[in-house]
Image: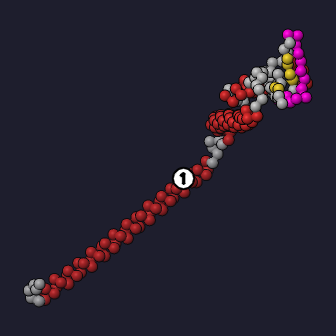
Amino acid sequence: MRIETCYFCSSRIYPGHGIQFVRNDCKIFKFCRSKCHAAFKKKKNPRKVKWTKAYRKTVGKELAIDPSFEFEKRRNIPVKYNRTTWNKAVEAMKKVETIKQKRQNTYIMQRLRKGREVENERDIKEVQRDISLIRSPAAGLKQRRAAEAMEEDEKDITSIQKGLSLSKTNKKHKVQDTGEMDESDEEMEGIIEDGGEVTL
């Protein structure tokens, strides 16, 4: 079964479908539907009509250059029928089709990813340019002042707490020092009472 392609939109034409136009110079044009035939009669360029595959390939929306397209070339050389070569050819056609579909899908996904990145950059620039529309400089001024006052109060409280803790530690040191002095005084008094004799 030979599947032809439409001259105008490049879609598939199955046997028993489509329109065929033969010009005076014996060139054959095949169209998938009357829409393509009418556009051809109006002398429209397929590369400039947005719904055709030719337009999508020229603009870069679809994969245009790939080795898998080489297998689709038309070959009119008759080959002697052989069952093994026929089966191999059918299997190869299926493999080529799957590879081509994967490559086309990856190409489209990469193209869409670039578009998303461009949109994000554009949105960021727009927000940076028109930030005054989103939030004015005076908005939230009271809240900022209140937050600053709260921070100052917290700093004052922490400094007071540090001062109190330092004074408590100083008092403890003084108390320990006075206790040691009392013990040494008692020892000296004991020595004096013994008559000045120091016993070790």
Outermost residue on the bottom side: it is 194
Which is nearer the eye, 1 or 167?
1
- For the point 88% across and 10% down, the residue is 24
Q: Amino acid at mark 1?
A: Glu
User: Residue 70: x and y, percent?
Assistant: 70, 26
Residue 116 in the image: above or below residue 52:
below
User: Residue 87: x and y, percent?
Assistant: 75, 36
Local crowd at mark 1 within 10 Å, few (<14), some, or many (≥20)? few
Q: Secondary structure at mark 1?
A: helix
Which is nearer the eye, 79 or 42?
79
Q: How many marks?
A: 1
Per the image, the residue denoted by label 1 is 148
Residue range (magenta)? 12-25
Which is nearer the eye, 11 or 169?
11
Answer with left or right where residue 21 lies relative to residue 181. right
Colour convention of the picture = secondary structure
Residue 83 in the image: above or below residue 19:
below
